[in-house]
Every structure is written in structure tokens, then in C-alpha cells.
Image (cartoon, rainbow, N blue to C red):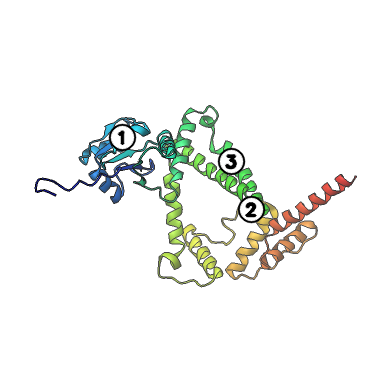
Amino acid sequence: MNATSRAPRPEAGPGRIVLLTTSHRVAPGLLSWPAWQTLHVADRVLCADGAHPQLPYLREAGIPVEEASSTAQELVDACAGGRTVVVVATGEGEPALTDGLARLAGTGRVRMPELELLPASYDLPGARLLDLVQVMDRIRAECPWSSRQTHQGLAKYGIEEAYELVEAIEEGDRDELREELGDVLLQVVFHARIAEEHPEEPFSVDDVAGGIVAKLVHRHPHVFGDATATTPEEVKEHWLRTKAVEKRRTSVTEGVPLGQPGLALAAKLASRVRTAGLDVPLPRGEGIGYELLALAARAEAEGVDPEAALRAAARAYRDAIRAEEAAG
């Protein structure tokens, strides 16, 4: 090799395509550190959505973003010479682009760049609840039926959905359980949305959530404080004591809704008496009502939900009826 000859330069790699995904449930600009690093070293940053919420923050950070939609082949060409191209994905993702890249790779005739999916922000647990609140806002504003509903008009649906949830639990149907939990959650969000419109005492779903968070923390000092509780019974006793102080109740019967089913009501009263350590004998009387009261109290003492037990027996009775009908 003479003095003027040079060693051949290594061939540049095929480059890299980075598909950057973000969550609309996280405030724009709150991206992961790997995402910012990749954006700063990229040769080109592309985004097909000119209204993407991340664009102002990227440009403020000194990252030039091209508002362009590229085909798979154009992206591969843009990576020639070892370049890195970042595609800021739209809210729907980039299915056409990823499908096109897959087809190119499948031909075996194209030297494909490295392909990387980089989540730049993640949904926190419970983030989809934000979607529910937004959907409920729109339905309340635009749906002729939903926009006219009141707390009073929706009350019956809350009862129905609660019973359907109980049925799904007792049937052991996981798919049905998930659906019924959603229906119960809808009732909560719907009522909270209506409550926002009250002219004098409005509150929102955030107020509802904030209230229950504060209550849970206050009533679980063995979790969030210095108290100790080693058994479920100790936890329940503390819960009831704290609740009595909060509500300033003078009787263990306060707060027990009389409108609930009779067996559940009787069992709840018996539970309050037992937990408070009171010695209150059952009233003596004639008739089936007093007999049912005694059965409910006995079931509660034995750790049996009398309502659930009766429903289970009723389902067995229903099955027997159907079997007899089928045999006939």
C-alpha cells in the first residue's frame, strides 16, 4: 500500500427508526429521560399530527420537529448512512407505517434499519378513569337522555347495578364481574357529574375521590399511622369506633339503612350489637318475622351472610323447578 492510499471506510449501518409513543393521560412534556435523550441525538424528528400536544414542548426544548407523514420506504431511505429518525406517534399509533415496515422487512430485499418502540410516557394505574370522566362530561352535555337525568331518577339504577354485581360475584363469572363493576362505577361518575351542576353545593368526582381517600387513610391508622391491628376483627372494631367519633353517633344503630332487604338489615343490627360488645336479647314475638330475625342473627354469629345463603338456596330451588319443567 503506497503512502497516498487510505484504508477503506467502514460501511455505515442501516440506521434506526424509533417510534415514540406517549399517553394523552399524562401532561404533555412529561417524557422519560431515555425519550429526551433519543430526541436530542436524532437526526430527524417527524410527526404526522400538527396538533400533537407534545410538539410545543419539544420545540421549546430546542428539538426541531417536521410535521410530515412519511411512507415506510421514505423512512428507510431517511435512515441511510446510519441516521436515526424518530417518529412521534399520533394518538391512534402508526398502524399504516408499522404495517408498511413489516411488509418491507418481509420481502428480504431491503436492508432494514433497526426498529425500536420507545414509550415516552406511561399510564399510571387508574389512568383510564380520566377517560371515563371525559366521556361522561360529553355524554352529559350532548345526549338528550343523559342531560336530563337527576339523582332521584338514577337512584333505581344504582340499586339494580349493585344487585347485578352481587349476582356476578356469586355466579363466579369473571367477565360478568368486570362488566358489572364498570356499570357500578358509571353510576358513581354519573352522579358526581350531575352534582357539579348544583347551584349552591356543587361537588365533583375529584371531591368524591378525595373524600374517600381521606376517610380510608384516617380509618386505617394501622396502615398509615402508628396503630397496630393483627386480626380482621381488630381492624373492624377500630373502623367502627372511628366512624362513631366522626359521625358523633349515640347509638350503634345509627347509619344502618332501614331500606335494605330484611335479612341483611337484621344481620347488620346483630353485627353492630356483637361488635360493640352489647348484650341485647332478641325480642320475643309471634310470627315468621321473629323467626327470620332469629335465623338472621344466628347466621351473622356464625359468619354467614343470610341474604347470600337465601339467594343460593333460591337458585337451587330455581334449578329444581327448571328440571321438573324439562322432565314434564
| First of labels 3, 2 by sequence position | 3
Residue 77 numbered mark, or none: 1
Q: Is residue 263 above or below residue 237?
A: above
Is residue 27 found left or right of 181 in the rendered image?
left
First in sequence: mark 3 vs mark 1 = 1
Q: Quadrant of residue 213?
A: bottom left
Q: Nearer the viewer, mark 3 or mark 2?
A: 2
Mark 2 and mark 1 residues within 8 Å of each other at the beta carbon: no
Helix, strand or loop at mark 2: helix
Residue that carries the numbered disc 2 in the rendered image: 169
Q: Amino acid at mark 3?
A: Ala
Circle 1 — which element? Answer: helix
State the residue in front, 195 or 80.
Answer: 80
x, y percent for residue 110: 37, 38
Q: Quick one: label 2 or label 1, which is nearer the N terminus? A: 1
Position in image of residue 47 (x %, y %): 32, 34
Q: Amino acid at mark 1?
A: Asp
Q: Which mark is residue 155?
A: 3
What residue lies at 45% left-to-right and 44% top-to-bottom? Answer: 128
